[in-house]
Image (cartoon, grey):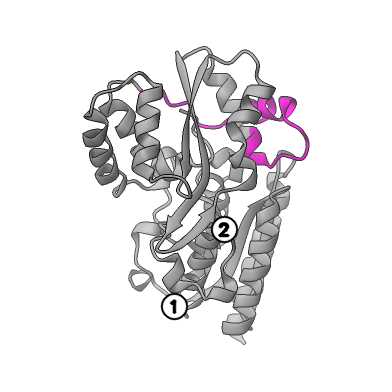
């Protein structure tokens, strides 16, 4: 299993299920510079950085496993509405096999709730792995329970604690709180994000990140702000929650270069901020394999300084 993309959302769910049907799960190591360079060498230039990193992890795992499980998250249902996954990840298995012809045997976990339930998708995965008994039902039940306790930072070695601290527990008089919105596979991969969360703290602010569960997308996000993409709507929901908290003085939007959906999402969030907190500063950070740490730190320090000046006025 690759430590990339939606593994940062569903790792415990997938791992517990696969173990429950009798498989040993091998997780690739944390992203490093070699992972990025390896994936970037074989990937088309149009791909976003997280997808290039996924390919780097695949190459790392290829010689260590007998079967590689690649997710294909096509469409998920929330309440009565259907939302699609990331456009590039829809074709992730096909692209991976085309770019890395030396792959071991592969299976797909295809989530497409236009056609069948999530349970049906896991049943098909079990069948593809040669498990024809009913043990997959118990395995899925245990996996769903286990995944409720999973946090994406569990896949990193971050000492980041802001998710676990309530805003009320912070010293708001001396601490500058900045909301950070971004996909978990970007924020919590230290190499990918260039330690963005830690750098923000070093610049003199506390990073506050939404929980990213996306449990009430339809209820919380106004219809005019909904997108067709479930993970992007999740970001909008998270941004709404941050904007509504007056203690948070600024908003940072973290995205990867060449992510087509984030261009739409970030604009929606900026309009949301303009409507509800017109004076709140918003900074967009675009990350790719060429982003320099020094330049990133300079931008964060300038952003923090700007907010401090505004709060003193």
The residue segment tinted magenta is: 25-52
Task: Residue 21 in the image: state x and y as whole percent.
Answer: 28, 25
Ranked by sequence position, the earlier of labels 1 and 2 is 1
Q: In this view, does 155 lie above or below 21?
A: below
Mark in the foreground, 1 or 2: 2
Would you place residue 234 above or below residue 90 in this image? below
As rendered, which of 313 and 100 lies closer to the eye? 100
Residue at image point 57% right, 58% down: 232
The mark found on residue 173 in the picture is 1
124 or 214, nearer to the observer = 124
Q: Can residue 87 be seen in this view?
A: yes
Work out whether residue 200 or residue 227 is closer to the camera in this orientation and state it. 227
Taking the magenta stretch, the answer to whether it contains residue 28 is yes
- Element type where label 2 sits in the image: helix
Which residue occupies 62% across, 29% down? Answer: 94
Quarter of the figure with residue 39? top right
Picture residue at 50% right of the left edge, 60% below the top = 234
Tell me the CA gap for discs 1 and 2: 33 Å
Left or right position of 153 against 150: right
Q: Where is residue 131 in the image (x, y as percent from the top left)?
A: 31, 21
Residue 278: horizontal and vertical position, in percent? 63, 83
Which residue is most to the right? 45
> Callout 1: few (<14), some (14-19), or many (20+) C-alpha neighbours within 10 Å?
few
In this rendering, position of residue 209 left or right of residue 279: left
Residue indicated by mark 2: 232
Please state the horizontal and vertical placement of residue 31, each as a whole percent of the image. Answer: 55, 32
Disc on res. 236: none
Q: Is residue 301 visible?
A: no
Mark 1 lies on a secondary structure that is loop
- The vertical placement of 22 against 189, above or below, is above
């Amino acid at each position: 299993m690759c430590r990339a993309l939606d593994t940062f959302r569903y790792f415990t769910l997938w791992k517990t299920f696969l173990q429950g049907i009798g498989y040993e799960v091998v997780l690739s190591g944390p992203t490093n510079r070699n992972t990025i360079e390896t994936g970037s060498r074989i990937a088309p230039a149009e791909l976003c950085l997280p997808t290039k990193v996924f390919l780097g992890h695949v190459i790392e795992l290829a010689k260590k496993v007998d079967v590689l499980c690649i997710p294909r998250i096509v469409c998920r249902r929330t309440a009565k509405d259907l939302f699609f996954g990331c456009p590039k990840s829809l074709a992730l298995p096909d692209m991976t096999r085309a770019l890395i012809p030396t792959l071991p045997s592969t299976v797909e976990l295809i989530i497409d709730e236009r056609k069948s339930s999530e349970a049906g998708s896991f049943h098909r995965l079990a069948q593809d792995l040669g498990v024809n008994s009913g043990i997959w039902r118990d395995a899925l039940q245990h996996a769903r329970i286990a995944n409720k306790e999973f946090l994406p930072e569990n896949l990193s070695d971050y000492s980041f604690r802001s998710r676990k601290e309530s805003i009320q527990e912070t010293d708001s008089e001396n601490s500058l709180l900045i909301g950070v919105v971004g996909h978990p596979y970007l924020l919590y991969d230290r190499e990918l994000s260039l330690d963005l969360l830690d750098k923000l703290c070093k610049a003199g602010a506390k990073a506050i990140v939404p929980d990213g569960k996306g449990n009430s997308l339809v209820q919380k996000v106004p219809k005019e702000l909904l997108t067709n993409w479930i993970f992007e709507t999740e970001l909008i929901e998270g941004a709404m929650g941050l904007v509504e908290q007056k203690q948070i003085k600024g908003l940072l939007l973290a995205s990867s270069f060449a992510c087509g959906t984030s261009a739409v999402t970030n604009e929606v969030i900026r309009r949301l901020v303009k409507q509800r907190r017109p004076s709140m500063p918003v900074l967009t950070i675009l990350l790719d394999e060429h982003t320099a740490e020094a330049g990133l730190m300079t931008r964060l320090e300038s952003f923090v300084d700007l907010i401090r000046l505004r709060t003193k006025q």
